Image (cartoon, rainbow, N blue to C red):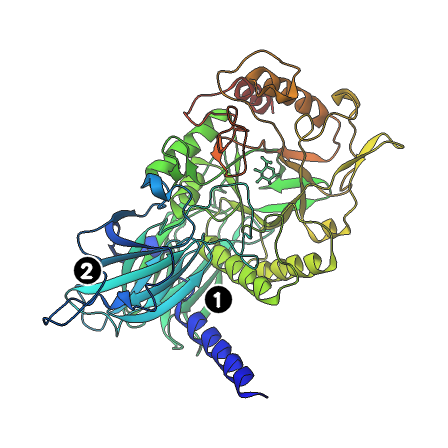
Amino acid sequence: MKPRTFYLALSLFLNLIFSHSMAQQTMTNVYGRNVQSLNGKWDAIIDLYDQGRKNKIFLNKKPETKIDFYEYSFDNGLRLNVPSDWNSQMPELKYYEGTIWYARHFDAAKEVDNRSFLYFGAVSYRCRIYLNGKEIGRHEGGFTPFQIEVTDAIKEKDNFLAVEVNNTRQVDAIPAMAFDWWNYGGITRDVFLVSTPKVFIEDYFIQLDKTKADKINASVELSEKVSQSVTIEIPELQLKQTVRTDANGEAKTSFASKKIKRWSPGSPTLYKVKVSSKSDRVEEQIGFRNVWVKGEDIYLNDEPVFLKSISFHEEIPQRKSRAFSEADAVMLLSEAKALGCNMIRLAHYPQNEYTVRLAEKMGFLLWEEIPIWQGIDFKNESTKEKAGKMMREMIMRDKNRVALTFWGVANETQPSAPRNAFIKSLIDITKSIDTTRLITAAFDLVRFNKDKQVFVMDDPFIKALDVVAINKYLGWYHPWPVTPDKATWDVAKGQPLIISEFGGEALYGKTGDADVASSWSEDYQATLYRKNLEMFKHIPNLRGTSPWVLFDFRSPFRFHPTNQEDWNRKGLVSDQGYRKKAWYLMKEYYDSK
Ligand code: GCU
């Protein structure tokens, strides 16, 4: 092997080992831990030409002699809110794609013998973390949490934390080069310093058995491979067991109870669950429900259910920024509740934990997905690995959330052997962690067969799914091939089918032209909804609908100068928070279900 190739291979190998070994899978239920928030105003440097790393600005050097010379400082310059995207914080950053450095000082009250971890709820899209002048970790993926142990790197006083964030789109990224939402960059979710005992409860998975209503399965894993006794308690059910972890620090058990009140959208019952070990204790609210598919029906707690769903992006349109707080979650979910929904499809990426936990309290079933959105590099092994890591990070974070019912593994992918292998690997990873939830994916492959006068779809891959989801924009991207009352479907027979996207755009306040597709009028959008709702009556295995989309949202490829202006206007609610005429049609339809 030529020397150059050897060194290239070596650096790649070291890079792989070094970078992946540092940003770890997060411990379960960070919000129930002993955390110090690092949210607030951080110093920032815009590094458009990527000069910061090579000039080691993460060392935060200050001139100490007359000849010292540094052409940077983090002090007294640009400051950005954390969490938030950077795009919404300065007009010049609206479209920014590139690197921005964030930095801050902090003290760490260190309890003797405790361990310390830096936790990031999400950083979009890739980042490198530097603490006290040393790189300590990297992460790729804009929508899942990660942590880095800093026990040995942290000081009592004046730690200097620098985060190099880059949101440049890349062919091998997830999502890739073009996607119908804003490419927000930044430290977009909470940042905590987490303190734990030396041996702590790293992970637990506590949920109702897949098919039994009176059996709760529990597994616990300690941070170290030690055998210790661990207690799991659900006080309201008078359940308490102490088990001993094995040499790997793991323990499994189950509880029997005839008194479990199963969670449902109409009765979102949650129980306090306490997990404790010799030196650690964590607790949170966990719900219990059964969900399975039988034939063309989806059963929730032994009853067939119709999914009255809606999608929203993780964005507050009035603020033109990412949603990231509990208050943001209240705004988005209250509007979904008002619409009469019992489910949310969290498009198109894992959204923040406030939204997931509040949805659970308010009574929404959830569909969560990673952004396998149209043009993904399915032939690229490293892209497949990245997707698997993102899937794992999403499922490991939310596996105890009873609201989570569907894991979405793709959105609008085209049939091919590489795509099938790629998505199959995601399904395998999903099932290796969680065997109880339903696996679904959204397709835009339904076509009208003129000979048979019926809508059909030809993608054998759907057999790998529990529930088949279809995105179809009749009356918007495609004219109606038949009148809606004659629009019969023969798609995914024998499996439950949901319409995961339908609709069209309207500029709030624009009226008239109820039959003009390019009018962008509320009346046309209403006509389109009426026709879709009529068509839904002719889909025999339809078990749910999810209009696209709750709120108008921002997208750089929505070019129309007066109707769009960088906004996708398919919202049932305008970017200013006003309900369009179609909202009331959807409300009436869901109330009738
Ligand atoms: C696609 C896609 C959405 C997109 C929508 C649209 O189906 O899944 O992310 O925003 O159509 O075109 O508005």
Q: Position of residue 131 (x, y in %)?
A: 27, 67
| Mark with earlier residue (1, 2) | 2
Front one among 423 and 319: 319
Q: Left or right: 147 with respect to 303? A: left
Q: Position of residue 360 (x, y in %)?
A: 44, 41
Residue 106 is marked as 2
Between the C-alphas of marks 1 and 2, the distance is: 39 Å
Front one among 222 and 427: 427
Secondary structure beneath disc 2? strand
Front one among 480 and 401: 480
Quick one: quadrant of the N terminus?
Answer: bottom right
Quick one: quadrant of the C terminus?
Answer: top right
Q: Position of residue 248 (x, y in %)?
A: 44, 76
The residue depicted at 49 percent of the width and 20 percent of the height is 508
Mark 2 residue type: Phe
The answer to whether residue 85 is seen in the rendering is: yes
* Residue labelled with disc 1: 252
Mark 1 residue type: Lys
The answer to whether residue 324 is seen in the rendering is: no
Q: Left or right: 158 with respect to 394? A: left
